[in-house]
Image: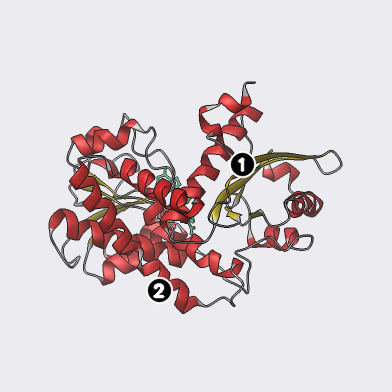
Amino acid sequence: MAFFDLVDFDDHEQVVFCSDEKTGLKAIIAVHSTTLGPAAGGCRFWNYASDEAALTDVLRLSRGMTYKNAMAGLKLGGGKAVIIGDPKSIKSEELFKAFGHSVNNLNGRYYTAEDVNITTTDMATVNQVTDFVAGLDGKSGNPAPFTALGTFLGIKAAVKFKLGKDDLTGIKVAVQGLGSVGYNLCEKLHAAGAELVVTDINQEALDKAATEFNAKVVGLDEIYSQDVDVFSPCALGASINDDTIDQLKASIIAGCANNQLAQNKHDQLLKDRGILYVPDYVINAGGIINVSLEIYPEPYCAEEATRLVEKIYDTLMTVFENAAKQDKPTGVVADEMAREIIANAGK
Ligand code: NAD
């Protein structure tokens, strides 16, 4: 494989392939950039179709973390790890310890944390063999409420910019996914006077949202075409794609999900349709902002985390204003701003 020529390689500083036959560990740790500080990003456990698919995923995710951390104003670079295999069959304490040794060997160039299929208990096991772990119970804890706060403020910024409204009273929001972040976000939107339309595969969460927030419940495929102001992807990646983009009636896309656009071209297509896309890694940075305070030398402080998450509003306003001035898609502008922050720090 022409490794260095891969589009997603994108000048990664370091990529480490980790293997431990005894425990079945096969992992890749990607350190995209440490220009702003130690690389930080979670570890995903996934049964990839191939090693190449795992490599592509970790490279994309780790570069995304570089941009996310830069735009959040953190003194952290970008990195990510993936463990390859079916978590249901190969998860074990010994495997996580072997992974922890690999993280430890990087000597603080990379901090790991939870991502898909990894729990705080798993990370506590990793923490038995390395200090380079964040997001632990009893420290910064669950990042979801901070991600929800940032997403709520991002929606407010988008509504102000696109619709000229300072508050969310009567604003209609379609929320796709009522998980840890999505449900918390709905709570905030409802309290602010927004009207909610929701969908999920979890009927219990839907019933609860209908009762607690007077939310209208719709089917999984119906959520895109709702007559709303804001479409808020809070479940899976790639929900904005060739099949869904033409169904959207919302003039704003603003949610917490990672990698919302299936392809880069969708950024331009949304702009062409007059839809304001709120770049995912800027609006959903609340969780990593909270986790970052566990990595910095100062003791963790929830008030400081909240203060930093609140800055997402102004950062997004700058993205929207720059995009309007330059007549460019918001995702492109956010990438350019992130690269500039990193380049300036590099000087
Ligand atoms: P979660 O697993 O708690 O929630 C996801 C929800 O989506 C679940 O309720 C699930 O039932 C629902 N869902 C699954 N498939 C669906 C579908 N086809 N249609 C509608 N709903 C569906 O996850 P979370 O922590 O709330 O994270 C949500 C998204 O935000 C993810 O993309 C995650 O990567 C991203 N994110 C989360 C955080 C965080 O702090 N948790 C931080 C940054 C980004």
- Choose the circle earlier in sequence order: 2 or 1: 1
Image check: 93 left or right of 166? right
Q: Which residue is mark 1?
A: 13
Instruction: Tell me the quarter of the picture where residue 182 sits.
Output: bottom left
Amino acid carrying label 1: it is Glu
In this orientation, does residue 192 appear? yes
Instruction: Please give the label number shown on residue 307.
Output: 2
Q: Is residue 256 visible?
A: no
Of residues 82 and 197, the one nearer the viewer is 82
Could you tell me residue 228's position as x and y percent? Answer: 19, 50
Amino acid of disc 2: Arg
Mark 2 and mark 1: span between their CA atoms? 31 Å
Could you classify mark 2 by the number of other residues whose Cα lies within 10 Å: few (under 14), some (14-19), or many (20 or more)? few
Look at the image and tell me in which quarter the N terminus lies.
top right
Residue at position x 30%, y 57% in the image? 316
Picture coordinates of residue 81, whole percent (x, y): 63, 46
Q: Residue at x 23, y 36 (%)?
A: 247
The residue at the point 64 percent across, 55 percent down is 112
Q: For residue 206, what is the image quadrant?
A: bottom left
Q: Secondary structure at mark 2?
A: helix
